[in-house]
Image (cartoon, rainbow, N blue to C red):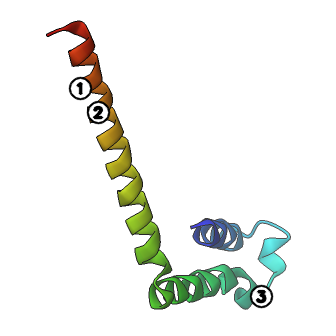
Amino acid sequence: MYLLGLGLALLALKVLEVDPVAQWSWWQVLLPFVLAAAWWSWADASGYTKRKAMERESKRSSERRARIQDNLRGIHRDGR
């Protein structure tokens, strides 16, 4: 995501002709987009994206389970 943001910033500077980016070649300005595409391709092909999504879901599930258990313990302590 950082590469995409960098690419958008460099593209805006190039189009608005802000120095020193205005003097750079288009390949230098567009390189972050190429690197972002390469990263996403690798992340999807290697399973990195799916693994991170599963870790996030597991963490949310564990937190939800702990919250429910804490709520149940509070109910039993109150005697209700």
Residue 72: give its label: 1
Q: Quadrant of the C terminus?
A: top left
N-terminal of the two: label 2 or label 3? 3
* Residue 77 or residue 43, whichever sits in front: 77
Q: Nearer the viewer, mark 2 or mark 3?
A: 2
x and y percent of residue 75 in the render?
21, 17
Residue 35: name its quadrant.
bottom right
Q: Is residue 51 left or right of residue 2?
A: left
Q: Quadrant of the N terminus?
A: bottom right
Q: Is residue 59 left or right of residue 30?
A: left
Graded by Cα atoms within 10 Å as few (under 14), some (14 to 19) or many (20 or more), the crowding at tag 2 reads few
On screen, residue 34 above or below 6:
below
**Residue type pointed to by label 2:** Gln
Tell me the residue that label 3 is attached to.
25
Q: Residue at x 66, y 79 (%)?
A: 32
**Residue type pointed to by label 3:** Ser
x and y percent of residue 49 in the render?
45, 76
Q: Residue at x 50, y 79 (%)?
A: 48
Kind of element beneath mark 2: helix
Q: Nearer the viewer, mark 3 or mark 1?
A: 1
Q: Residue at x 65, y 84 (%)?
A: 30
Residue 42: name its quadrant.
bottom right
On screen, residue 31 above or below 67:
below
Residue 69: give its label: 2
Kind of element beneath mark 1: helix
